[in-house]
Image (spheres, helix red, strand yellow):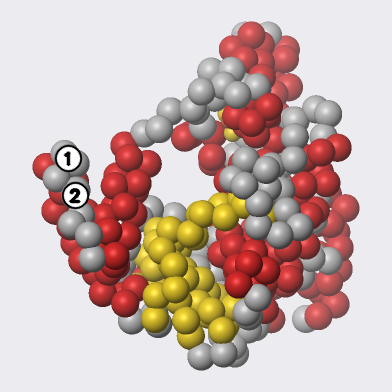
Amino acid sequence: MRLYSYSKLSTYETCPQKYKFRYVDHLPSLKGAPATFGIAVHKAIADELLGKPSNILNLPMEDFFRAKEMVDSATEISRGLGEIVDIERRFAYDDGEVEWDRGYFRGIIDLITKVKGGLGVWDWKTGYKTPSVFQVSLYAYYMQKLYGKPVEKMGYVLLNTNSILEFDPSFIPQAKEKEEWLVKRIESDRNFKATPSEACSYCDYIDSCTLNRAVTEARNNIEAVKLYQSILVQKESLKKQQKILKGYVDNQAIDLGKGKVYSVELEPIYRKKKGYDFDTLIRELAMKHPELIKFDNAGLYDIHPEAFSVIQKKVYKER
Ligand code: SF4
């Protein structure tokens, strides 16, 4: 199987077993209300920008006004991002642009604009979750290949806050490296381990999950106790990692580009404005400081035990 997308890579990153259920076993996933809402809003923004009549009237009444507000403001913000080159650009890429089903990597980019010195690459986001630098950087990489021009600006139009979350294009090569690293892991993975995290609460495959089944089967016996203990250990380890990373960020004032300094303890409103939360921060630390954070099957939050001591040494050495 050699057809990747951001969604595939991020699913694997979240949980290899979830990836297996969705992309290897092809178990159906539920397209819930948030997805339907997002699709309708994306289509309406694209229509507005193309000067076509947009239709969000088929949304339920409680969603209609919110959608309308988002479409109006996203249209205005998008028009300010430069001359429009393309809208909802579908691409499939291998050693050049190929048919949709034949690419190595494929995706849809919401908006491409002309900016000073090259291109602007933008995605519209309707959700509350802070979008990842990985996605837009990877899309920017492929746009550079397709258009033969550098991407000078890239980021997200956050429709919930009517704001722009911009990233430095210096992330592009790192995103490509991360993509290749993830693809290698996917292609050599034989176990597709379940890696529980907060994402389990909205996982479509919770009923099929081996971990969930193990909990059910092991209830009231020694296995349940072992499982419970291992979760406690994992929780403790995560707490320690969080503390160390927080200390590292707060004390070292990590500069992630453009002279901006980020801290995990920023006021929520500031964080929202800048679009940074702890999750994003960890992702960026992993990209900026790959020697500090190693990925394992547990995904971004689960730092490999060996890397944990490296972080500790590094943090204390730098203090
Ligand atoms: S419920 Fe959690 S651990 Fe199980 S497959 Fe889904 S994300 Fe993975």
Q: CA distance from mark 2 to mark 1?
A: 7 Å
The percent coordinates of residue 260 (x first, y second) are 56, 85
Please name the residue that numbered disc 1 is placed on: 58
Q: Nearer the viewer, residue 131 or 271?
A: 131
Distance from mark 2 CB to nearest ligand 1 atom below 8 Å: no
The percent coordinates of residue 20 (x first, y second) are 68, 29
Q: Amino acid at mark 2?
A: Asn
For label 1, the crowd category at 10 Å Cα-Cα, with few meaning under 14, some 14 to 19 and many 20 or more, is: few
The relative height of residue 214 versus residue 60 in the rendered view (above or below) is above
Please name the residue that numbered disc 2 is placed on: 55
Label 1 secondary element: loop
- Residue plotted at (26% across, 55% down): 44
- Residue plotted at (18% across, 61% down): 69
In terms of image quarters, where does ligand 1 lie? top right
The relative height of residue 275 versus residue 206 in the rendered view (above or below) is below
Q: Nearer the viewer, residue 211 or 7?
A: 7
For label 2, the crowd category at 10 Å Cα-Cα, with few meaning under 14, some 14 to 19 and many 20 or more, is: some
Quadrant assignment for the N terminus: top right
The percent coordinates of residue 59 (x first, y second) are 19, 41
